[in-house]
Image: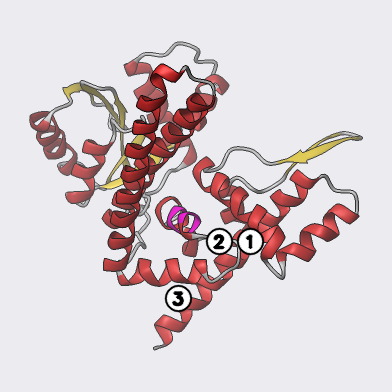
Amino acid sequence: MNQNIATITDPHYVAIDISKDSLQVHTSGGQTCRIVYDKAGLRRLLKSIKSLPDPLVVCEATGGYERPLLGTLHQAGIAVNLINPSRLRAFALSEAIKAKTDPIDARMILRFAQQKHLQPAPPPEPVRQELAAMLDRRSHLTTQLAREKNRLQKCQKAIATSIRRMIRFVEKEIASLDAQIKLLIAKDRRLAAEAQLFQSVKGVGAVTAWTLLAYLGEMSRLRRNQLVALAGVAPFNRDSGKASAKRSISAGRSKVRKCLFMAAHTAATHNPVIKPYVAGLIARGKPYKCAIVAAMRKLLIHLHSLLKQHQQHSLAL
């Protein structure tokens, strides 16, 4: 699937603040309205947006409420840019806007889009969205499994049987979900090839490979520095004047970072490249956790390089 998308020289921004039951809309042309968030409302909104010259819809992620809207827009071929809520809130505070209502939020989204000259983002691939949903559910189940196992260690005899029954049930659900994930990836030649490529690196298991496929789909389109920053493993300077504080990582995609952390632990023991790299950092006085973060970064860059080579080889055939 081609993920390239053309830039828009002078986009007509349509800022939408999303809530559970309504959409607050503000456009760069000065139109404002509030629309009921249902199928009829989406049809009305779509008709209005299509009448605008070079429309670009801008909204913030809302933990899932944005999905029906984005699905409708992508299906209709409308350009979209989804903003990180923390960036938007920081922008509002920089503008001395402390109040928070739907109309205020919509105005902030519009002002942010105009000042940052936002451009369309590539639409997500449906198969990666489905994979991400399955992995989210898998995470819910593994968290529940850990809780039940912890309860079993200190529970009364009267409820031990119930907890063991729940553990067996959750384990079966995880196994069933793993089978569905494997089948989904196997049906897509591109994802299957990338999953196999990632797992060829010692330390990278199936779950880490699935996570990269689901939550870092733009991996091949990014430069190295962009990639490590997006994953949250780029160390940022904290210097001011003569003071030089310890560099640290921040933000990024936590789901990717967590999996990379576990993969780096394994690679530090078994990977012939990562193992001496981590040992060398520790020998130079680096704390173990700092060495592991460096290993995460090195591992991700290596996977990025392998993916680039694989894609170039595929195009050459």
Q: Residue furthest left?
A: 40
Q: Callout 2 environment at 10 Å: few (<14), some (14 to 19), or many (20+)?
A: many
Q: Which mark is residue 204?
A: 2
Left or right for 197, reference 66: right
- Asked whether 210 falls inside the magenta stretch, the response is yes
Indicate the secondary structure of the residue bearing disc 2: loop
Q: Callout 3 environment at 10 Å: few (<14), some (14 to 19), or many (20+)?
A: few
Q: Which residue is mark 3?
A: 311
Q: CA distance from mark 1 to mark 3?
A: 18 Å
Q: Which mark is residue 299?
A: 1
- Asked whether disc 1 touches disc 2, contact meaning CB atoms under 8 Å apart, the reply is yes
Q: Nearer the viewer, residue 189 or 230?
A: 189
Instruction: Tell me which segment is drawn in magenta.
Output: 207-211
Q: CA distance from mark 1 to mark 2?
A: 9 Å
Label 2 is placed on what type of residue? Val
Label 3 is placed on what type of residue? Gln
Which quarter of the rendering shows the C terminus? bottom left
